[in-house]
Amino acid sequence: MTKETGGNAFPHENHLSHRGMSLRDYFAAKALPTILAAGGVIDSEHFFENAKLAYEKADAMLEARK
């Protein structure tokens, strides 16, 4: 399964071989602390569910950019 990533979060013309994180990953990373602060559980049993929710939020942000 391939997701639209939104391109590179921090593109740099001189380092094309080091593309860095995708915009989707950046959005998910920004969403995760809010999810955890809103009652998400950090333990390993629940962390995957929180990460999945963060990517759902990132996908929504990418969709909103269209």
Image: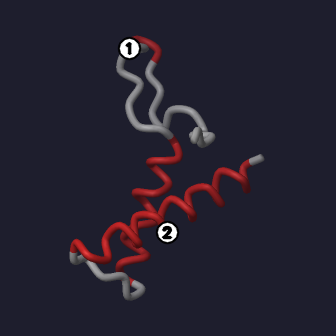
- Does 31 appear above or below 37? above
Q: Amino acid at mark 1?
A: Ser
Task: Give the residue type that dot 2 points to.
Answer: Leu
Residue found at x 36% / y 82%: 40
Q: Quadrant of the N terminus?
A: top right
Q: Residues within 10 Å of mark 2 (few under 14, many from 20)?
A: some
Q: Secondary structure at mark 1?
A: loop
Q: What numbered label is drawn on residue 25?
A: none
Quarter-wise, where is residue 2 in the image?
top right
Q: Going by the image, does 54 lie left or right of 36?
A: right
Could you tell whether 47 is left or right of 10 in the image?
Answer: left
Q: Is residue 59 left or right of residue 20?
A: right
Query: x, y percentage for residue 57?
Result: 57, 64
Q: Mark 1 and mark 2: span between their CA atoms? A: 30 Å
* Up/down of 51 relative to 43, above or below: above
Report x, y in % for residue 8. Answer: 50, 32
Disc 1 marks which residue?
17
The quarter of the displayed image where residue 56 is located: bottom right
Q: Residues within 10 Å of mark 1 (few under 14, many from 20)?
A: few
Q: Earlier in the sequence, mark 1 or mark 2?
A: 1
Q: Is residue 17 above or below residue 8?
A: above
Please, what secondary structure does the residue beneath circle 2 have? Answer: helix
Report which residue position mark 2 lands on. 53
- Residue shown at the point (49%, 69%) measured from the top left: 53
Residues 64 and 48: in front is: 48
Furthest-front residue in this view? 1
The image shows residue 13 at horizontal and vertical percentages of 47, 15
